[in-house]
Image (cartoon, rainbow, N blue to C red):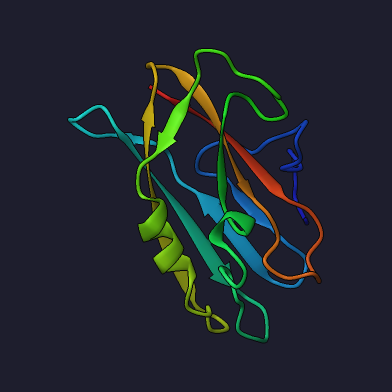
Amino acid sequence: MEQPGLSGSVSQPLGPGATARYEGGLWVTVGRPERHDDGTYGVTVTFKNGTDEELHLGEETFSETLDVESGESGEDYAPGHHVTWLNRDETASALAPPLPECEERTVPVTLEPAREGAPITLEVPPPHPGYRETAHFQLTLG
């Protein structure tokens, strides 16, 4: 990734509203969590294709393109921080079509934390072998 400041790695995760910039022109931005009246949270993940070819974001399985983990980045076990991803199927559908060059796609993620203030990590692995490393975004729900 080509990043000023935090690298987006496990040890230096990006925060809400930040953008991971991959070599070759792919940009991924994770929005700030928004609380809904029912206690769930919505987060958007925007993929911007600045490459010179279409990208297959969900070619294999969407979990290879986007994943949600309970706890802080790099934490193996996060007791009391469980989070449920409520719209996995909707996310998979949004990631399935190829992303044309010079276009962007915003994918909604709906989460339900076990408790307010739960930290979560969104991991965005590279969708193409030509890109290098997974971008980590650390957020707090509440």
Q: Where residue 65 sits in the image (x, y, percent)? A: 60, 59
Q: Residue at x 67, y 86 (%)?
A: 52
Q: Where residue 130 sits in the image (x, y, percent)? A: 81, 71
Please tell me whether residue 34 is drawn above or below residue 20 in the rendered image.
above
Q: Residue at x 45, y 62 (%)?
A: 92
Left or right: 10, with 82 as reference point: right
Left or right: 114, with 57 as reference point: left
Total marks shown come to: 0
Q: Quadrant of the N terminus?
A: bottom right
Could you say which quadrant of the image residue 11 lies in?
A: top right
Q: Residue at x 54, y 53 (%)?
A: 29
Judging depth in this view, the residue of 31 and 64 nearest the camera is 64
Please tell me whether residue 2 is drawn above or below residue 98 in the rendered image.
above
Could you say which quadrant of the image residue 136 lies in?
A: top right
Judging depth in this view, the residue of 55 and 27 nearest the camera is 55
Extreme top residue here?
80
Could you say which quadrant of the image residue 41 lies in?
A: top left
Q: Residue at x 63, y 25 (%)?
A: 72
Q: Where residue 17 sits in the image (x, y, percent)? A: 50, 43
Q: Quadrant of the C terminus?
A: top left
Q: Where residue 129 sits in the image (x, y, percent)? A: 79, 69
